[in-house]
Every structure is written in C-alpha cells, then in structure tokens.
Image: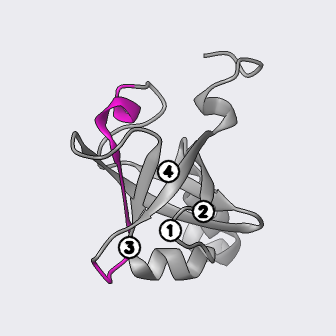
Amino acid sequence: MREDDEGPSKGINLVVRASPISGSGIARVHISILELAEFTEGKVALLVFGKRKRVLRLVGDSMMIRGKVSLRKKDMEWLGVKEGSKVTMFPVANIGDRIRERLKMFRSRDDEA
C-alpha cells in the first residue's frame, strides 16, 4: 500500500469496547483487520488517543464487531479512554530495529567491540 493511499498506513479508526479482563497488553480486533498486510496476529500495533500512545499485541476474534477494538482495563486507563471512545491503530514496523537503535546510546565503547 502506498503512503498516499487512505488505509492502514494512515491508521485505522476503531471504537473502544471494554474488556472484562483487568490486565493489559492485548488489543482484540475482528479477524478482517488481520487479513491486511500491515497487521499480523500476535504482532504489535500502536493505538493512539490524542497524545497518548500504547503498543499492544493484536489478537483476532471472529466474534468481535468490525470497527471495534476490545481493550483491557489497564490499557484503557493508560490511554485515557472509555467505552465508545475512538482510537486510531497504526502498524508498527521493524520494532526490533528501532529498539536496538535506541539501546546503542546505553552501550559503552567496550561493549561495541
């Protein structure tokens, strides 16, 4: 998908549904989203609400309503959302490379040898 196309590279708008689970770290979406090349089951995606961001692991569910995302309570608190709030989900590419790049600043010269 090209950068100028309307689509996942620009983000997908989803309506929040509250999960009864109090944990965190998982965004449950309809399986049709996982059919898009940018999103993969078990991989992470970035959810954005205003200036707040959260990286969550995607889980597909055929019972989920299209256009909704089920978030756990702690993730909802972190994002500052309530049931019915609209969030935008973006793909996260090359997260391993991005983390590795940021870790370089913590290495000493001896570690790089």
Name the residue: 50% across, 68% down: 83
Helix, strand or loop at label 4? It is strand
- Amino acid at the residue labelled 3: Arg
Q: Which class describes the residues within 10 Å of circle 1: few (<14), some (14-19), or many (20+)? A: some
Identify which amino acid the numbered label 4 is placed on: Ala
- Between 82 and 97, the residue placed more toward the observer is 82
Which x, y percent locates residue 38? 49, 31
Give the CA distance from mark 3 to mark 1: 11 Å
Is residue 113 shown to the viewer in this render?
no
Q: Amino acid at mark 1?
A: Glu
Q: Whole-percent x and y of residue 96?
A: 49, 52
Is 26 one of the magenta-colored residues?
yes
Left or right: 113 with respect to 59?
right
What kind of element bears circle 3?
Answer: loop
User: Closer to the N terminus: mark 3 or mark 4?
Assistant: 4
Q: Find disc 2 in the rendering and name its residue.
A: 85
* Residue, far front: 84
Is residue 15 rendered to the left or right of residue 53? left
For the N terminus, the quadrant is top right
The residue located at (54%, 62%) in the rendering is 84
Residue 71 position (above or below residue 23) = above
